[in-house]
Amino acid sequence: MDKLTEKSCVEFAEVLASKSSVPGGGGAAALVGSLGVALCSMVGNFTVGKKKYAAVEDDVKAMLIKAEGLRLRFLALVEADAEAFEPLSKAYAIPKDDPTREAVLEKATLDACGAPVEMVKCCGEAIELLEEMRVKGSVMLISDIGCGALLCHAAMESAAMNVFINTKSLTDREKAESIETEVDSLLNKYLPQADDIAASVTHQIRGGD
Amino acid sequence: MDKLTEKSCVEFAEVLASKSSVPGGGGAAALVGSLGVALCSMVGNFTVGKKKYAAVEDDVKAMLIKAEGLRLRFLALVEADAEAFEPLSKAYAIPKDDPTREAVLEKATLDACGAPVEMVKCCGEAIELLEEMRVKGSVMLISDIGCGALLCHAAMESAAMNVFINTKSLTDREKAESIETEVDSLLNKYLPQADDIAASVTHQIRGGD
């Protein structure tokens, strides 16, 4: 399969819109995560080398390395999410009276949770980086920090939705609930942090009204 | 200038991350809007032709045309946002004692509001379409409707942030407030609608807990 992320933005949006199961909401979420953390990098790249920010230069450089790693992980997750869909689609196509169907479908459904769970984790890391960059990065680019937080928030919730649509149909309820609990705890930790970043940026731009 | 949206997703994310002012938060917002409305199209494309949805087929086909138009408008806004930045950047470079500076900067700042205001409007239209598709489209793809609403919500707030960062520095306060009022009224109308779509989808997937 050709890499989805090698397609142009125009083509990616077109194939997302088309009657093709991949990419879908999961792949879109991962791409949006990569854009959110890219904005964190952009702010860092405009911060390093500035006298005003010399005291935090080493911290910002360390953040830039982490942010680049996250961007690449998000992009790889666009592909991983698509790759997990094919076995799931084939499992659904197994005749309902085939005795192997349930086990194959269960495994494919569980595997399809992998990429979106990883996206949720990456979004949490991206939101932590954005918070640190909000504090240490150039104030000239404060709106880009705000946008980054908004995009990572949406990517995280979208990825979680793609976890829950899969765990919902797992027969192994213990496994399903264990995955859901892990994802919920990440959402509960990081979504409010992303909200706080966006609110703080809005306050800086618009003042106290 | 080469079109930003003709770059691959990998390259777009890379240039977004780089020390280059465009694309920035505005361009990312427009791209995310295009992905959100593309998910609406995907659901529609899987709905048409299905017996179960024959009664709404004409409505879904009409929505597909609108959604495609919106996707292309969002992608054009990635470019328009970048194009408005160059004159703004040049205006900032005019020496502070040049008597033409203030007027040139004011015009460039006002022009830079154009693309993000248009993005906010497109997000509103996309959220309306997603709500109609949630009701009429295939329930098999309900999570994609939810993701679409989450992405358009984030795109709308991000675009608005890019309006406000510009209106903040306009000298003509009457003009600034008129733009801000228009954007606020769209945010107040459509952000809760996007929240309702996402909440309704989450309820459908996870049940009443």
Image (cartoon, coloured by chain):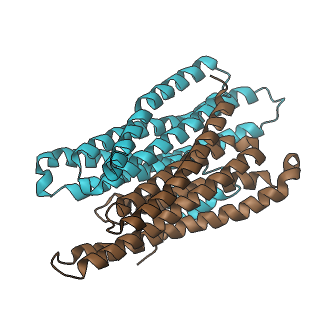
Chain colours: A cyan, B brown
Please name whichever residue, B179 or A21, is drawn nearer the observer in this view of the structure.
B179
Query: Is residue A146 visible to us here?
Result: yes
Relative placement, left or right, of A32 versus A203 is right
Residue B28 at what x, y percent from top left? 44, 58
Residue B6 x/y as whole percent = 49, 70
Q: Position of residue B203 (x, y in %)?
A: 66, 31
Q: Residue B78 appears at what percent x and percent y?
A: 47, 67
Total labels drawn: 0
Quadrant holding the N terminus of chain A: bottom right
B130 sits left or right of B123 in the view: right
Identity of the residue drawn at 71% across and 41% down: A90
Closest to the observer, A101 or B149: B149
Q: Nearer the viewer, residue B76 or A34?
A: B76
Q: Which of these two is toward me, B32 or B5?
A: B32
Left or right of B127, for residue B24: left
State the residue at coordinates (66%, 53%).
B128
Task: State the image quarter where residue B4 is shown.
Answer: bottom left
Q: Is residue A7 visible?
A: no
Q: Is residue B106 left or right of residue A183?
A: left
Q: Residue furthest front?
A: B174
